[in-house]
Amino acid sequence: MMKWTHKQSIAYECAREVITDMIGFCSHWIAEESAKEAPDADRLAQLRADIFKLARERSSLHVTDDAEVTRIRTEYGAIVRARYQAIES
């Protein structure tokens, strides 16, 4: 059995949560686009593809994959922080 550290488990859970936030943003944008009188089918398709990609990343993530956990936290974390700051402004 593979073992991991407490620090790895926290980083892993943070990475999973930041992916969940990204999926939530995409879902919100799908709802907004769908509510329009003339929704943009290409935008909806891209957002659905983004959700699928993010869900795949989340399900394939492993607690001991330090490089991928760090990449996700860095890349998506910056996006999520910026979006929450924009919402709060």
Image (cartoon, rainbow, N blue to C red):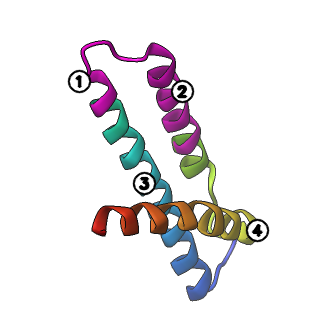
Q: Earlier in the sequence, mark 3 or mark 1?
A: 3
Q: Earlier in the sequence, mark 2 or mark 4?
A: 2
Query: What amino acid is labelled 1 in the image?
Result: Ala
Q: Which residues are magenta?
A: 32-54
* Residues at discs 3 and 2 in contact (Cβ within 8 Å): no
> Disc 4 on helix, strand or loop?
helix
Measure the alpha-carbon separation of dots 2 and 1: 16 Å
Helix, strand or loop: magenta stretch: helix
Q: Which residue is mark 4?
A: 67
> Disc 2 on helix, strand or loop?
helix
Measure the alpha-carbon separation of dots 3 and 1: 23 Å
Q: Is residue 5 magenta?
A: no
Q: Is residue 64 above or below residue 53?
A: below
Closest to the camera, between mark 2 and mark 1, is 1
- Coordinates of residue 87 in the picture (x, y in percent): 31, 62
Disc number at residue 77?
Answer: none
Report the residue at 51% width, 42% height from top.
Answer: 55
